[in-house]
Structures are given as structure tokens and as C-alpha cells.
Image: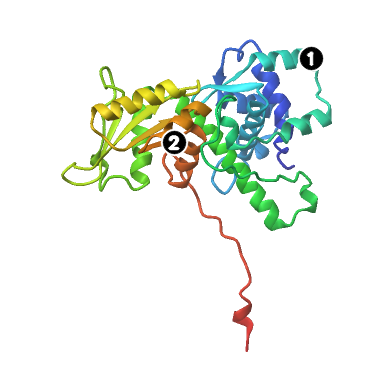
């Protein structure tokens, strides 16, 4: 018997997270097993694996939790720990078991773009590309379904990356920011990017030497914030740059920037803004804290058969 599809794991995961033993947060591995028990998976089903080597039931439990997070019903309390939210508790109280099939389908198809990581009062700092998502999978070609699946995987990874960034220490976030900038091509070697954040840092968290003699430098401010970065923070950073007699600065945050902050950055020279949405995209594109695997897609070579 095949392992149930991931939508069938949604309710067992949510119900278990609402139990007293899990209500304050519990290891994801315990949720995997509890969901498998609730669905009465046998040993053969629990031992089925993906090409990556991950048990299929664990993978589908993870996707169920991803959908619950997107609905605001659960969260990652810390790395490897899942927890129900207050909204999740209210949802459980309002929805006796079992959930109607239509409600499970709604939760299973919640899809948020990476732009949703940006706070409501923040504005985009680069052009937005809106992807149309067709839920009618039966009418899509295999190539279209593959494109849609890859986009969904990317969005899920972006969400997980953002959560991970919010859970690291401010010092670790500063190191990550410098790693990203190095992968973007700043500095001949990683040693050309130095973290200087800490007490008395003067508003500067990192310095990038663009040449061996250190004559050309870029100064970095890294804010691991959930609140939106406003104009006062940008003005303070600009003042810190002036104090260093610097011409270039990069302000990077896990959050976003207000319209006033973006306008200020445009009114002066040499400041580049990178918000949480752009940051996680850069981390995926340049594989910082992310790994990727190649997928081999067979396609016939028509020229091979020519006489």
C-alpha cells in the first residue's frame, strides 16, 4: 500500500501539535512518528524512501507542517522543533475532527510567494515578478507541472531560510551576510570581508576590502530584525559611513524597508538596500546555507536518428 499523500498528514500533524505533550513545542521527529501512528502506517510504508534517502512519510509530514505554517496554524519554535500557534489552537476549537475534505484541500494548496516575508508596512526595493499558479494540475503539461513544483520548492526553502535567519544570533547573522556578499563577488578572498559588529561598532557591522591595499572599502550594516527598517536607521547608517569617510555601504536586513527609508537611500549616493526577500533569494541562487541537486530530465535527440 502506498504512503498517503501529504495532504492526508495535515490533520494528524495539527492534532498532535495541539496535545498537551506537544503544545509548548516538540521535536519534529516525534511529530513524524505520531502522524505515522495516526495514519496507521505499517513497517513497509515507513521504510519507503525517496531518491534522496529520506523516508517518504517524513517528507510528507514536513510538507504538511509547511502548509500549516503558511496558514499561520503552526510554527518552528526553533531549529528542529514544531509548535502550534494561538491561531492553531483557535482553529482546532472551531474544527472538530475530521476536517472536511474541502478544508484539507484548502490548507494543502496554500501558496505564499517569498515576497510575503516582507512586513506589511515595507515596500519592495526591486521589481516584483508575479507568478500565476494554476491549481488545475490535470490541465497542465508535465513541463508546466515541473516548473510549478520547482517554484513551490523554492518558496518553501525561502520560508525555511528566513526562519533560520531569525533564529540565529545577531553575530552569526553578520557572518552570514558577509558570506553572501563574498559569494556575490565582493573581496578577492573571504579574509577581505571582516566582521566588526559589536558594542561600539559605530553602526558598522562589516568591512569589505575591494583591493589588496584596502584603499577601496564597502561598509556593511546587518540587521536581524522583524520590525521594518525606517528612515532613522538609514540616516544613522549614512552618518556612520560619513564618519568612516566611506562612499559605499550595504544595508541588509531580514525584514524590509519603509517607503521613507527607500526614498532616503535613493536621495544619497552609494547605499544599497537588501531586504529579507532579496536576501533569501541570493542565498538560494549562490548556495549560501543551501545545497541543490541536479535533476536529469530525458529528452529525445532527434538528430541522432537522422540518416
Side (left or right) of 259 relative to 151: left
* Outermost top residue: 20
Q: Total marks drawn?
A: 2
- State the separation of the CA atoms marked 2 and 1: 48 Å
Q: Are marks 2 and 1 in contact (CB under 8 Å)?
A: no
Residue for point 33% across, 32% down = 220
Which mark lies nearer to you, 2 or 1? Answer: 2
Q: Which mark is residue 266?
A: 2
x and y percentages locating residue 124 in the rendered image: 55, 35
Q: Nearer the viewer, residue 134 or 20?
A: 134
Q: Residue at x 64, y 10 (%)?
A: 20
For residue 133, above or below residue 206: below
Which residue is drawn at the image coordinates 60% and 25% (left, top)? 120
Does 71 sit above or below residue 282? above
For disc 1, the neighbor class at 10 Å (few under 14, some 14 to 19, many from 20) is few
Counting from the top left corner in percent of width and height, residue 32 is at 61, 28
Q: Earlier in the sequence, mark 2 or mark 1?
A: 1
**Image x and y of residue 82, in percent:** 57, 22
User: In the rendered view, would you say 77 is above or below 193?
Assistant: above
- Residue 179 lies left or right of residue 120; in this view the side is left
Q: Position of residue 135 (x, y in %)?
A: 76, 43
Front-most of residues 152 and 247: 247
Quarter the C terminus occupies = bottom right
**Front residue (pair 28, 171):** 171
Q: Mark 2: which secondary structure?
A: helix
- Label 1 residue SS: helix
The residue carrying mark 1 is 94
Amino acid at each position: 500500500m502506498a504512503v498517503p499523500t501529504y495532504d492526508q498528514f495535515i490533520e494528524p500533524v495539527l492534532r498532535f501539535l495541539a496535545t498537551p505533550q506537544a503544545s509548548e513545542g516538540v521535536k519534529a521527529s516525534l511529530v513524524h512518528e505520531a502522524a505515522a501512528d495516526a495514519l496507521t502506517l505499517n513497517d513497509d510504508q515507513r521504510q519507503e524512501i525517496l531518491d534522496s534517502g529520506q523516508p517518504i512519510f517524513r517528507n510528507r509530514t514536513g510538507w504538511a507542517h509547511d502548509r500549516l505554517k503558511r496558514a499561520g496554524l503552526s510554527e518552528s519554535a526553533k531549529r528542529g522543533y514544531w509548535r502550534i500557534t494561538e491561531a492553531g489552537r483557535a482553529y482546532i476549537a472551531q474544527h472538530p475532527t475530521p476536517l472536511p475534505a474541502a478544508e484539507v484541500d484548502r490548507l494543502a494548496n496554500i501558496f505564499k510567494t517569498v515576497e510575503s516575508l516582507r512586513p506589511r508596512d515595507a515596500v519592495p526595493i526591486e521589481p516584483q515578478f508575479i507568478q500565476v499558479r494554476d491549481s488545475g494540475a490535470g490541465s497542465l503539461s508535465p513541463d508546466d507541472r515541473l516548473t510549478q513544483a520547482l517554484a513551490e520548492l523554492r518558496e518553501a526553502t525561502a520560508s525555511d531560510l528566513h526562519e533560520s535567519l531569525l533564529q540565529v544570533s545577531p553575530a552569526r547573522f553578520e557572518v552570514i551576510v558577509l558570506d553572501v556578499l563574498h559569494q556575490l563577488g565582493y573581496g578577492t578572498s573571504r579574509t577581505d570581508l571582516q566582521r566588526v559588529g559589536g558594542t561600539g561598532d559605530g553602526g558598522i557591522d562589516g568591512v569589505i576590502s575591494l583591493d589588496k591595499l584596502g584603499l577601496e572599502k564597502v561598509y556593511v550594516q546587518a540587521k536581524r530584525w522583524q520590525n521594518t527598517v525606517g528612515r532613522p536607521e538609514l540616516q544613522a547608517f549614512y552618518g556612520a559611513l560619513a564618519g568612516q569617510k566611506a562612499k559605499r555601504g550595504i544595508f541588509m536586513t531580514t525584514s524590509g524597508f519603509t517607503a521613507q527609508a527607500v526614498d532616503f537611500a535613493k536621495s544619497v549616493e552609494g547605499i544599497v538596500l537588501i531586504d529579507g526577500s532579496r536576501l533569501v533569494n541570493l542565498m538560494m541562487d549562490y548556495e549560501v546555507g543551501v545545497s541543490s541537486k541536479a535533476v536529469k530530465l530525458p529528452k529525445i535527440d532527434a538528430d541522432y536518428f537522422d540518416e
